[in-house]
Image (cartoon, grey):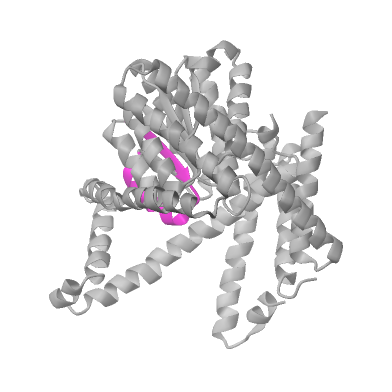
């Protein structure tokens, strides 16, 4: 019964959104807006569940871990969760205090992690560029042109490098990417259709 | 009908009919489908076997996308693979660690794992499973998941779903702890990173086909047949479109703007 209801709700919500995409009919637009609202409500419940999970996992880390650093990290995380929740609930998520904490701690932290990516790229490139077979050789050869084409010294070495670099990006690279994109798009469509029609029931248990 | 979407609707209907017909065709046994072996999928039991022998856990990430939006099918494909992986970890008594970015994916992953352990008759072993919501912020998740991988040192790490700039970070940290890594994504811009850093990678549509290759279910196999027919139609449309446009006709431009 529960499974049938889940499948029915999935079908109904999906078909409303699809029809509203193609047809400009008043009641469909209203129904789509309602479905989107329900989506937001479900997401809010999911966030509450996720927060509970976060608290459970970190309390377990505090109580059972032998590593002092791990315990401190878990305490800091829980403290941040409590402080941000209190400020968000009492002053709102657009208040100055909330923004100062977010912009002053969260945003620089995220930027730092993002910036660390350059080191990961270097170590990954080092391994990828070791010429062990023809494929790796082609990768190294094309990458060398693309990298040299992106910096001024490339043109100094040979004036044709920027043009070759651009051709690699625009023609063979683009052709491969678009081929993958079409395949992935059709695959996603097929998966969506199976879910919508209840043919694929793995997600409803 | 909204202007500019008539051709899309036509394609939507044609593709839907083809996929449903193909599914039905295969289910009735009118055609035997043999899909090519996906080395990444075949390597999954080997990776879990290695974790069993090493006595180390297995890490799984269903990607960073939600269950709504354009990338949602990738999340569902990742969850389908989680179902298979959880069955194997239950069977071999290996600890499973799942890191989650999207809150809505958390109950989905928990329920999928619970079902898998039930089906394997290992409900008691569920205590060995850690499904962790880390953060819904992209790089906070990346940092936290990297930390989990560094601390827990999984022998195998599976990254199946939609990933963005953080994918290299997760894969590189996996390499640092000497994890056997299998990835899969249809986020085209991220495929090169996974190909160069993980042991096996499901590229684009292979992620969606992986579930079919695991189950050998006629419905899934029929969907693969339908996908191939639709791909043929798309290629034909591309070729005809190029020729028609090259000879100076605006037929395709008008058709697409219908």
Residue B53, image x, y percentages: 36, 16
The image quadrant of residue B10 is bottom right
Residue B82, image x, y percentages: 54, 31
The image quadrant of residue B31 is top right
In this view, the residue farthest toward the right is A27
- Taking the image as shown, residue A124 lies to the left or right of residue B37, namely left
Magenta stretch holds residue A186: no
Q: Is residue B106 above or below residue B58?
A: below
- Taking the image as shown, residue B72 lies to the left or right of residue B255, namely left
Residue B220, image x, y percentages: 65, 39
The image quadrant of residue B12 is bottom right
Q: Residue at x 79, y 59 (%)?
A: A19
Please report the bounds of the magenta region as a residue range.
B179-198
Q: Is residue A126 above or below residue B48?
A: below
**How many tags in the picture?**
0
Magenta stretch holds residue B195: yes
Answer whether residue A48 is visible to the viewer in this image.
yes
Q: Residue at x 29, y 31 (%)?
A: B177
Quadrant location, the N terminus of chain B:
bottom right
Quadrant location, the C terminus of chain B:
bottom right
Q: Residue at x 28, y 77 (%)?
A: A163
Answer whether residue B29 is visible to the viewer in this image.
no
Residue B45, image x, y percentages: 45, 25
């Amino acid at each position: 019964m529960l499974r049938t209801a889940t499948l029915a709700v999935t079908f109904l919500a999906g078909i409303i959104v699809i029809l509203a995409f193609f047809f400009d009919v008043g009641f469909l637009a209203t129904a789509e807006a309602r479905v989107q609202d329900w989506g937001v409500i479900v997401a809010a419940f999911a966030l509450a569940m996720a927060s509970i999970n976060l608290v459970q996992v970190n309390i377990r880390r505090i109580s059972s871990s032998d590593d002092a650093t791990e315990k401190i990290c878990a305490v800091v995380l829980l403290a941040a969760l409590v402080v941000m929740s209190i400020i968000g609930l009492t002053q709102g998520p657009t208040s100055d205090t909330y923004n100062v904490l977010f912009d002053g701690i969260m945003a620089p932290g995220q930027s730092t992690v993002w910036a660390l990516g350059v080191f990961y790229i270097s170590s990954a490139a080092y391994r990828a560029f070791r010429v062990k077979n023809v494929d790796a050789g082609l990768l190294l050869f094309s990458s060398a042109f693309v990298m040299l084409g992106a910096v001024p010294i490339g043109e100094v070495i040979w004036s044709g490098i920027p043009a070759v670099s651009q051709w690699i990006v625009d023609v063979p690279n683009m052709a491969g990417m678009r081929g993958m994109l079409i395949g992935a798009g059709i695959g996603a469509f097929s998966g969506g259709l199976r879910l919508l029609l209840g043919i694929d029931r793995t997600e409803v248990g | 009908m909204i202007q500019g979407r008539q051709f899309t609707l036509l394609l939507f209907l044609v593709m839907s009919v083809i996929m449903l017909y193909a599914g039905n065709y295969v289910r009735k046994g009118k055609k035997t489908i043999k899909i090519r072996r996906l080395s990444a999928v075949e390597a999954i039991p080997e990776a879990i076997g290695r974790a069993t022998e090493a006595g180390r856990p297995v890490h799984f990430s269903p990607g960073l996308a939600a269950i709504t939006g354009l990338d949602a099918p990738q999340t569902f494909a990742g969850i389908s693979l989680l179902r298979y992986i959880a069955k194997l970890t239950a069977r071999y008594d290996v600890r499973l660690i799942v890191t989650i970015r999207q809150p809505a994916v958390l109950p989905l992953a928990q329920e999928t794992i619970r079902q898998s352990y039930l089906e394997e008759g290992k409900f008691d072993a569920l205590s060995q499973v850690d499904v962790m919501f880390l953060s819904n912020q992209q790089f906070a998740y990346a940092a936290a998941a990297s930390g989990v991988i560094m601390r827990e040192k999984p022998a195998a790490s599976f990254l199946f779903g939609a990933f963005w700039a953080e994918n290299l970070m997760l894969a590189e940290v996996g390499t640092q702890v000497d994890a056997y890594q299998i990835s899969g994504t249809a986020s085209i811009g991220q495929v090169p990173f996974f190909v160069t850093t993980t042991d096996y990678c499901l590229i684009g549509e292979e992620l969606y086909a992986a579930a079919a290759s695991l189950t050998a279910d006629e419905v899934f196999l029929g969907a693969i047949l339908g996908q191939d027919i639709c791909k043929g139609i798309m290629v034909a449309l591309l070729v005809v479109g190029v020729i028609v446009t090259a000879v100076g006709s605006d037929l395709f431009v008008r058709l697409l703007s219908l």
